[in-house]
Image: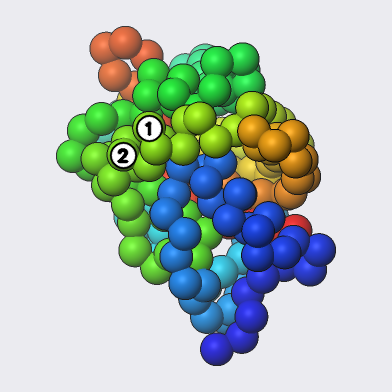
Amino acid sequence: MENCESPGINERGIQKLIQARNICIPPWGDCDSIQASCGIHPVASHVRLFLQAILLITLFSCNSRPELSEKQKETIVVEVREMLQQYDDDIRKNGLMAEFAYLDSSAEFFWVPPGYSSPLSYDSVAIIIRRNAATFRLVDNVWDSLRVIPHSESLATFTGTISSRMIDTAWTSMDVSLIETGLAIKRSDGWKILSGQTAVLH
């Protein structure tokens, strides 16, 4: 098994990253890597499983629902972008507990963190958010690139790269780059994050 730790990020830094993304610290998996959809970023091989699941969902939604108009697509893109921006802004201002307002709490929710080959449920993520909420003084995530693809009036995928800065209670700071792909769903109270995958770039 190869060492999957990215150059320039030590073990303590990886642990802080994992805590900041509200996940348990797992053993790192195999480093059989693939190119992401943009064709430039190597990511862990299990990302393929998530992307295949997203593909099945989107194919189903395309085949079972009327095609969206260009105006509808534009509206969905704007709404999902605004949701993701507000999500990051709220975490920056109010800490990790602000995440709950943006995560879909249904049984269908899952997230695949760095190093995992299987997803975490909403309940598992909620426990970890509460446990780690006091760990960081600041979590500042900024999308460097973001693409939103509407699939129906209530489903859209998003993918992009993120610059993340984390400052813990000892004022230790760490900067990392992430790649994230997810599925957003529109509920009665707005767009929520239903599922997704985060991986460390460097």
Q: Residue at x 40, y 68 (%)?
A: 117
Front residue of 54 and 6: 6
Figure check: 117 above or below 51:
below
Front residue of 144 and 135: 135
Cα distance in 3D space between marks 1 and 2: 5 Å
Q: Residue furthest right?
A: 8
Could you tell me residue 74's position as x and y percent? 56, 19
Tag 1 and tag 2, C-beta contact below 8 Å: yes
Q: Residue at x 29, y 19 (%)?
A: 187
Count of marks overlaid on the render: 2
What residue is disc 1 on? 130
| Image quarter (top left, top right, bottom left or bottom right) of the C terminus | bottom right
Rendered image quadrant of residue 84? top right
Q: SS at mark 2?
A: helix
Could you tell me residue 175's position as x and y percent? 77, 45
Q: SS at mark 1?
A: helix
Q: Is residue 77 visible?
A: no
Amino acid at pointer 2 = Ile
Q: Residue at x 66, y 49 (%)?
A: 178
What residue is disc 2 on? 127
Could you tell me residue 150's position as x and y percent? 47, 32
Q: Residue at x 47, y 54 (%)?
A: 113
Q: Is residue 73 left or right of residue 60?
A: right
Amino acid at pointer 1 = Arg
Crowding at dot 1, Cα within 10 Å, few <14 / some 14-19 / many 20+, comes out as some
Q: Residue furthest bottom?
A: 1
Q: Which mark is residue 56?
A: none
Could you tell me residue 48's position as x and y percent? 47, 66
Q: Residue furthest front?
A: 170
Q: Is residue 29 left or right of residue 131?
A: right
